[in-house]
Image: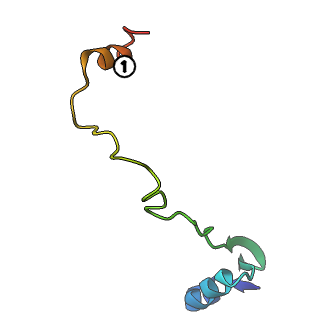
Amino acid sequence: MQVTVHAAKTNLSKLIEAALAGEEVVIAKDKQPMVKIVPFPRSRFKIGILKDKIAGPGPDFFEPMDNEELALWEGGGE
């Protein structure tokens, strides 16, 4: 569907719904296509996806490193 800028201002919510439903929505100025409304891809990221799958507590990043580990980080170890 192609609409004018004025129609897009008036019907923005409907145009967004149309784009989310898979319809191609183009906004034109003087019959020249200018922009297209497209939905962002939906992420399937889920917080806690590895919960109960990792054994034991994770590292405590706020605890100081021992001297051997610190030397490795600073390039002084092998």
Dividing the picture into quadrants, the one containing residue 24 is bottom right
Q: Is residue 26 above or below residue 13?
A: above
The residue sitting at the front extreme is 55
* Local crowd size for mark 1, using a 10 Å CA cut-off: few (<14), some (14–19), many (≥20): few
Colouring scheme applied when the structure was drawn? rainbow
Dividing the picture into quadrants, the one containing residue 69 is top left
- Element class at badge 1: helix
User: In the shown orientation, is residue 14 left or right of residue 46?
Assistant: right
Residue that mark 1 sits on: 73
Q: Quadrant of the C terminus?
A: top left
Q: Position of residue 42 (x, y in %)?
A: 59, 69
Q: Position of residue 22 (x, y in %)?
A: 72, 81
Q: Position of residue 47 (x, y in %)?
A: 44, 63
User: In the shown orientation, is residue 31 left or right of residue 49?
Assistant: right
Q: Position of residue 23 (x, y in %)?
A: 74, 83
Dividing the picture into quadrants, the one containing residue 65 is top left
Q: Quadrant of the N terminus?
A: bottom right
User: In the shown orientation, is residue 39 left or right of residue 55?
Assistant: right
| Amino acid type at image mark 1 | Trp
Residue at coordinates 67% horizontally, 87% vertically from top-left? 18
* Foreground pick, 46 / 10: 46
